[in-house]
Structure formats: structure tokens, C-alpha cells
Amino acid sequence: MLGGVVRSRQARRLTAKAGLHFPSGSAALSPKPGTMDKHITPGELLCLGSSLAFSGLFYYLYRRKARVVARIQEAPKLQVDDNLPALVSAAEGRCLPYVALEGIVLPAQAALTSHYHEGLQGVIQKLLLKEHRLIWNSLVRSCRNKAVIIPLYSALVRLHLESCVRFWAPQLRKAIELIESESERVLSEQIYTVPFLLASPVPEAVTQVSVDSPLQAVCLPLEMVYERFQQPTHSLRDLLGQYLIGEKPKGILETEEMLRVGAGLTGIGELSLHPDGSLHLQPPAQGGEFFLCLGDWQTVLSELEATSGLWKAAALLCAAAGLAVLLHALCRAYRRSRPRQHQEDKEPDGEEAGDQAPEDCCVICLSRPRECVLLGCGHICCCFRCFQALPTRLCPICRGPIDRVVPLYQV
């Protein structure tokens, strides 16, 4: 039995010399402290994933706007004049894929007339009727359901309270806004348009460009020509009904917007020359956004650059947040692994200590020197303590019987 133990220890020593390591005892079955710790928590993983997802989305929006900005910067900047037909006819396919064209708005037929201003004409008209309502939030509704007398009293004297706040304590208006939230609902929206042209500001020029599909533009170039907010009158019965419902009509907003005749307009899109000799500005057939704006093309460019910069900043912010979460997790993992590594460096394994033992060490304990000669085989193989611990009087090397032991004195 002892010989098997000696052979196993010798085999372990050889495997350690070969660069292999087999931990013994409970160390082979139980993991080292901290090896099962999670280097990143579920919350950090969620923050990292969401920040990367939002960063990718914002970067996509930024690149999309940046491509539009670059295309507008590269587009030819033209004005409506008599040289325009010759320029377009010389282009490939008698078409300029993307240009910025400036001109004066003129109707191709009878213009639209404003409903509220006599003599004001335009080519695009938008009539909007929007209702504004005050809605109590969920906290106020829950409190109102629990208590009845106090809310009824507040509903009855609300007009008086609002007048007091308006005249004596305007800073308390924010407290009322916390109780109520304003909502909007479009009651009616009507858009009318007539065919219109872009003409040259020079009276002598006769060239005109027809604008096709203006409603497909990214934003309609409209001006506010009329705005009126009508506040309803509330009776005591109306106040009680509004309290029970939880909503109060604030008023109705009525607006009118128009693209007026004679306004300066810039169109960014495809300019083509039809077989009948007419010029048409239309949405790009090869992809791209169609713009109609009041003013020059630099106004559109500045707005797009501002939007592109906003998406870029949002993408960088989300990426920085994700990087911060990742660095925090890596630093925590490094701080946890550093003490273990330091402890492992200070406490070498028993096999490594055995490799550094001298050549004449005991073949049983592999730590103390050989101190005795076993007779009658004559092997010098163990220390005196291990000899005393032998269960049988047999040599650990040759398994021969041991007659007597002679101490070994090394100088």
C-alpha cells in the first residue's frame, strides 16, 4: 500500500514537471473563492444593451441626416431665369437629379382666398381646428374618489381660486399645473392646394417652373395668417359635470396657414424638362427627400445640420454611457481577481515545492532529506520519521524485508 502511495506521488511529481497541475483533496472539488462571482450584474447588462441599441439607432438617424446634408451641399444652386431650359436640356436624360431652385410663387390657375383676410391669396391653405382640454392626473382622481366633500368645494370655488392666483400669487400657478395636465385633440384639419409655379423675380424673364406634388414635401412652407383661441363659458352645472368626468374644456384654437402668392420659395428636388418644353420640379425619382421652404437653401441646410448634430450627440452620449458601464464591470472584476492572484503568488502549490526539493529528499514525504540505510537491501530512500510511519517492514523501493536500519550521517 505504501508503495502505491510513493508511486502516485512520483507520478504527480513527473506531471508537475511536465507543466500539468492536478489539485488534490478538497481543492479539486470546490472552486476557488470568487470564481463563481458574476463580473456583470443583470442591471448593468440591461443598461449596456439598451445604451448600445439606442446608440446604434441614433447613429443611423445621424448618418441618414448627414447624407441628406452632403447631397444638398453637392446639389447645383440655381435660380429661375431664361437660361434654365438650355441648362436642363444639356443634362443627361434632360433631367437634373437633385437641385436647389429659388423663385417666386405664382398660381397656375385661380388662387385660393383666405377665409379671414379679404384680398389675401395663396396656393396652399391649411385650416386647423384644435380643442384644448385640462385633465386631472391619476393621483388627483384617486384622492377625489376617496374624498367627496373637499373636491366638491374646490370645484365650486375654483374660478374664485384661479382669479386669486392670477392677481395675488402668480407663482402658485405651477402648483395648479401639477394637478392638471393639458391635452390637445384635432377636431378638423383641411388642406387645399392649387397648381403653382416658380417664376423669376426679374419681370422680363418668361421662364417658369411647375411644382409637382407639393404635399409630398418634408414640411409645408406655410405662414400663419390667422389664429384665434375661443374660451368657453362655464356654468355651475357645467363645473359639477366636469368634476365628475375629470376633464375641463379649456378652449378651441382656430388657425389658418397659407403659402402666399409672391412669396420667395426654395425647392430642393428633381428638375426635369418635359417634351412639351415645360420645366417641372418634383420629388426625386432616385430616392431622396423633397424640400419646399421659405427663404434660401441655406435655411434648410442649417436646420438639417442642427438635427444631425443632435442625433450625433445623442449617439455619443449613449455610447459613452455603455462604455462607462462596461469599464465599471471590468474594474470590479479586476479588483476581485487581484487579491486572489496575489495570494496564489505568495502560496505556491505543494507539487511546485516538491519540484524545488533536492535530489536526495525522502521518496515518501518529498520534503526532508534521506537519513537512514535500510538493510538487508541497502537502499537509502527515506527519512527516519517516514521509516517509523511505515505500516510494514518492507522497503518502499524494492518491497524487500528490512532487517535493521542504520543512521546515515552526511557531511
Image (cartoon, rainbow, N blue to C red):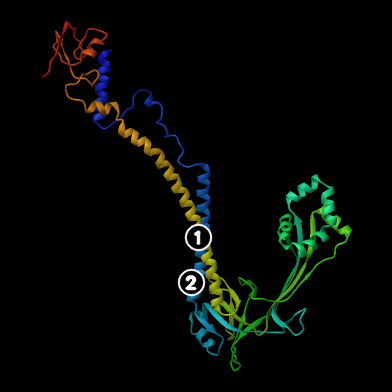
Q: Is residue 275 shown above or below 154?
A: below
169 to the left or right of 82: right
Residue drawn 83% across and 66% down? 232
Provide residue 97's location: percent of width, then percent of height. 52, 76
Q: Is residue 257 shown above or below 278?
A: above
Q: Amino acid at mark 2?
A: Ala
Note whether residue 229 is visible: yes
Judged from the image, the secondary structure of the residue bearing numbered disc 1 is helix
- Distance between mark 2 and mark 1 Cα atoms: 16 Å
Provide residue 333's location: percent of width, then percent of height. 42, 41
Provide residue 172's location: percent of width, then percent of height. 73, 59
The residue most toward the bottom is: 204
Dots 2, 1 in contact, CB < 8 A: no
Circle number at residue 59: 1
Q: Who is closer to the viewer here, 73 or 375?
A: 375
Note whether residue 273 is visible: no
- Quadrant where the C terminus sits is top left
Quadrant assignment, res 337: top left
Residue drawn 24% across and 10% down? 388
Image label count: 2
Circle number at residue 161: none
Quadrant assignment, res 178: bottom right
54 to the left or right of 385: right
Q: Who is closer to the viewer here, 390 or 267?
A: 390
Q: Residues within 10 Å of mark 2 (few under 14, many from 20)?
A: few
Reading the image, the residue beneath label 2 is 70
Work out whether mark 2 precedes mark 1 in sequence or the reverse, and give the earlier one: 1
Residue drawn 23% across and 30% down? 17
271 to the left or right of 183: left
Q: Who is closer to the viewer here, 42 or 258?
A: 42
Q: Amino acid at mark 1?
A: Tyr
Residue drawn 37% across and 35% down? 340
